[in-house]
């Protein structure tokens, strides 16, 4: 045990020393240590105080948090069968430990004693927030239940943790299992050279001749956008939509039903009408009714525009190729063609200006101008894969701010999509400001023998998005780890990420990094103008799509009787009714691969992407009024949003930055859904 690298004192994760057999004993030991820390608080004979109870409890399980952050981050970015097996074993342990803590009567009694005295304690706003959140985490998770109900809650939580893991594993297995090998050059007609080369290289790696297309986004999206062969687009689209919905061992239908039923039971047990009522009590939105009002108000504004865009696209496809009925596998293909025709803007024309390394330099430069950060690539800390880049981040005074890990390319064992995560949260402990260790993970096309990694404009905005989350983590400056960085309301967490995307559309920012990878020529300004003009292209349809996901999520989690649902597919069709544009595909189902809400923590929270768009459009309007690199506005954003984490109510922080409440008009104008005059 003493040789277990995870149980040593380490600053950065000792990836190269960790073996898979280290995880279980390390986590068991860390749980024991955390339990001892809880006993020390409970057995303290002094009267409960903020320091000996509230603060002490916030520090419980630091070692456990460090170990599990390494483990679960790798289970997303670098997994294998053994790690997945360990995840299934340890998830119930962690769930049980959390319940042991929350349902510990003596511990809750001390927490409640301090909470009941809060008005006389002269606490700072951050201390008040810590106490409030801590008390609620007990009260909202069963501390007031009787013993029989506490036992039931433990069972529900253990089962839920297992099911969400299984859900994710099934989606990953389905993604990895599908390969479309094409041996006829006509079948890749229309694909850009870079996409063809990547498909050829992928085939060679697997020992095949021809071109290999997979369900990984860098392979899937170019094919759906450019491949001329409609039947093959259909085949690939159906394969993507069938994940978790096939009659095989990876079917997620029953898992979806089980998860929503268990969440509903759990909410009822805790005194809430639905899972959505439970979740939203602690969000900016507060209630399911407010969320539905918000989604439906946007739906009302977006639907006429979306229908008109869809009709135009359908007419265009008919005129071009005689297609009578536009299908889901036609969407990206004809949208790209129409966009090119309307704006003379071709993603492939833009890609040479977005070499990955240049875009990384660009997001660093933007962060430097706004927030005085400097980034230096280093090789002095361990990494979990050779693709990972590591950076030391300092401020303009040379003070250390954070370590940053960046993992950009797809590979087996890495789930699709893009995300930001943390290996260590910022906190002030024993008068030392412990700085964070943050990671961003993406899935961009790998360099080939002849070309570097060239990003689509969507991928550029994805990188800026994840980097906005990273800034929230890196610039954290709070006392308590549990309130640090991205530990904020879920409907506030997307503000820093979504606001940073706006710089991708601005001439002043693009000139810093959008340079041709061969000639060094700065992106022509007419391209920048076209990027801006086309930014709201099909925004009605895009908005409808996002709203459909939010409404589906609320249907699953805000309904009163999920036990009456027998068919996942029928339920989903009903939820999508008000947002439907394309004909349904009977072989496909969204819910069975909707990892955000069944694995990733967004249950009853998917609306928050749109909610945060209202905040980000309003926030960026302030930057535009004063100048996109205006230091005063940037300092206000840094000091009132990025550095504050969850130390105060999000609306209070936002108003302090902006001077007023957010207004949805800025979003609707940006989306072209209302007149900007």
Image (cartoon, rainbow, N blue to C red):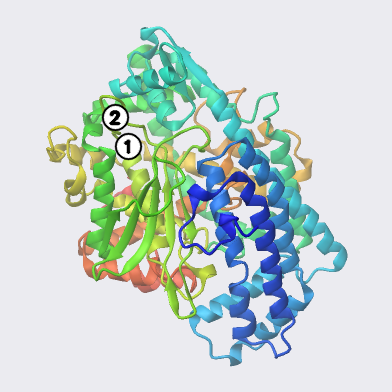
Rendering quarter of residue 257: top right
Q: Position of residue 657 (x, y in %)?
A: 35, 70
Dot 2 lies on which element? helix
Q: Marks 2 and 1, how far apart in space?
A: 7 Å
User: 7 above or below 431?
Assistant: above
Residue 125 on image: x %, y %: 49, 81
User: Looking at the rendered structure, which numbered label has been put on residue 83?
Assistant: none
Q: Residue furthest front?
A: 3
Q: Residue at x 34, y 51 (%)?
A: 379
The x, y position of residue 569, in whole percent, is 66, 31
Counting from the top left corner in percent of width and height, residue 373 is at 27, 62
Residue 314 visible in rendering: no
Residue sitting nearer the eye, 252 or 346: 252
Rendered residue at 40%/22% (across/down): 223
Q: Is residue 234 above or below residue 71?
A: above
**Foreground pick, 286 / 485:** 485
> Is residue 653 in sight in this rendering?
yes
- What number is the disc on residue 339? 2
* Left or right of 673, for residue 534: left
Q: Which mark is residue 537?
A: 1
Q: Mark 2: few, some, or many residues within 10 Å (few <14, many ≥20)?
A: some
Q: Secondary structure at mark 1?
A: loop
Mark 1 and mark 2 in contact (Cβ < 8 Å)? Answer: yes
- Eyeballing the image, is 556 above or below 620? above
Q: In the rendered view, does 205 fall on the left or right side of 90?
A: left
Instruction: Choose between 319 and 404: the one closer to the eye.
Output: 404
Disc 1 crowd rating (10 Å Cα; few below 14, some 14-19, many 20+) is: some
* Sooner in the amino-acid sequence: mark 2 or mark 1: 2
Residue at (57, 57) in percent of width and height: 6
Q: For the image shown, how many numbered marks are present on the structure?
A: 2
State the quadrant of the N terminus. Answer: bottom right
As drawn, the residue found furthest toward the bottom would be 120
């Amino acid at each position: 045990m003493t040789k277990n690298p995870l149980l040593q004192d380490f600053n950065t994760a000792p990836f190269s020393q960790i073996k898979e057999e280290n995880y279980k004993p390390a986590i068991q030991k860390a749980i024991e240590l955390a339990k001892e820390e809880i006993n020390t608080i409970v057995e303290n004979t002094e009267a409960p105080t903020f320091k000996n109870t509230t603060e002490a409890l916030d520090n419980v399980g630091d070692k456990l948090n460090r170990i599990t952050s390494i483990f679960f981050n790798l289970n997303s970015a670098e997994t294998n069968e053994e790690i997945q097996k360990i995840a299934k074993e340890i998830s119930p342990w962690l769930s049980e430990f959390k319940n042991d803590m929350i349902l510990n009567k003596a511990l809750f009694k001390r927490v409640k004693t301090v909470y009941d005295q809060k008005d006389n304690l002269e606490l700072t706003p951050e201390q008040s927030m810590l106490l409030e959140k801590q008390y609620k985490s007990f009260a909202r998770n069963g501390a007031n239940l009787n013993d029989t109900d506490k036992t039931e809650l433990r069972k529900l939580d253990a089962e839920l943790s297992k099911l969400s893991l299984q859900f994710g594993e099934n989606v990953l297995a389905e993604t990895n299992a599908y390969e479309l090998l094409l041996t006829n050059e006509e079948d890749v007609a229309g694909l850009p050279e870079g996409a063809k080369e990547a498909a050829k290289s992928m085939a060679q790696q697997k020992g095949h001749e021809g071109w290999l297309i997979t369900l990984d986004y860098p392979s899937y999206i170019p094919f759906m956008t450019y491949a001329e062969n409609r039947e093959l687009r259909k085949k690939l689209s159906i394969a993507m939509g069938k994940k978790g919905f096939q009659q095989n061992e990876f079917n997620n239908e029953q898992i979806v039903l089980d998860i929503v039923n268990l969440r509903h039971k759990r909410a009822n047990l805790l005194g809430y009408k639905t899972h959505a009522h439970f979740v939203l009590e602690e969000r900016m939105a507060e209630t399911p009714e407010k969320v539905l009002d918000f989604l439906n108000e946007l739906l009302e504004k977006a639907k006429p525009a979306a229908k008109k865009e869809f009709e135009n696209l359908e007419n265009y496809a008919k005129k071009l190729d005689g297609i009578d009925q536009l299908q889901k596998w036609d969407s990206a293909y004809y949208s790209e063609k129409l966009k090119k025709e309307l704006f003379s803007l071709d993603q492939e024309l833009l890609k040479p200006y977005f070499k990955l390394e240049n875009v990384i330099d660009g997001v660093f430069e933007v962060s430097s101008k706004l927030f005085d950060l400097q980034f230096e690539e280093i090789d002095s800390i361990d990494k979990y894969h050779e693709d990972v880049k590591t950076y030391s981040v300092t401020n303009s005074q040379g003070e250390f701010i954070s370590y940053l890990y960046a993992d950009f390319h797809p590979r087996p064992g890495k789930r699709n999509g893009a995300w930001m995560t943390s290996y260590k949260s910022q906190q002030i402990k024993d008068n030392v400001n412990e700085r964070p260790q943050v990671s961003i993970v993406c899935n961009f096309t790998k360099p080939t023998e002849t070309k570097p990694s060239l990003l689509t404009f969507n991928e550029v905005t994805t990188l800026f998005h994840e980097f906005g989350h990273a800034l929230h983590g890196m610039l954290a400056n709070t006392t308590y780890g549990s309130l640090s960085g991205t530990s904020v309301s879920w409907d506030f967490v997307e503000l820093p990420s979504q606001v940073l995307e706006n710089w991708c559309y601005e001439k002043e920012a693009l000139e810093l990094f959008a340079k041709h990878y061969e000639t060094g020529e700065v992106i022509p300004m007419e391209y920048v103008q076209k990027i801006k003009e086309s930014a709201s292209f099909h925004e009605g349809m895009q908005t409808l799509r996002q709203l459909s996901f939010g409404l589906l999520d609320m249907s699953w989690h805000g309904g009163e009787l999920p036990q009456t649902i027998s068919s996942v597919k029928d339920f989903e069709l009903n939820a999508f009714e008000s947002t439907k544009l394309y004909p349904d595909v009977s072989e496909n189902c969204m819910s069975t691969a909707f990892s955000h809400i069944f694995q990733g923590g967004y249950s009853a929270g998917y609306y928050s992407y749109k909610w945060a768009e209202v905040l980000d459009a309003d926030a960026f309007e302030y930057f535009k009024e004063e100048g996109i690199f205006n230091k005063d506005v940037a300092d206000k954003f840094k000091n009132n949003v990025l550095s504050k984490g969850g130390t105060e109510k999000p609306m209070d922080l936002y108003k302090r930055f902006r001077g007023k409440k957010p207004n949805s008009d800025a979003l609707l104008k940006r989306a072209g859904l209302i007149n900007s005059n």
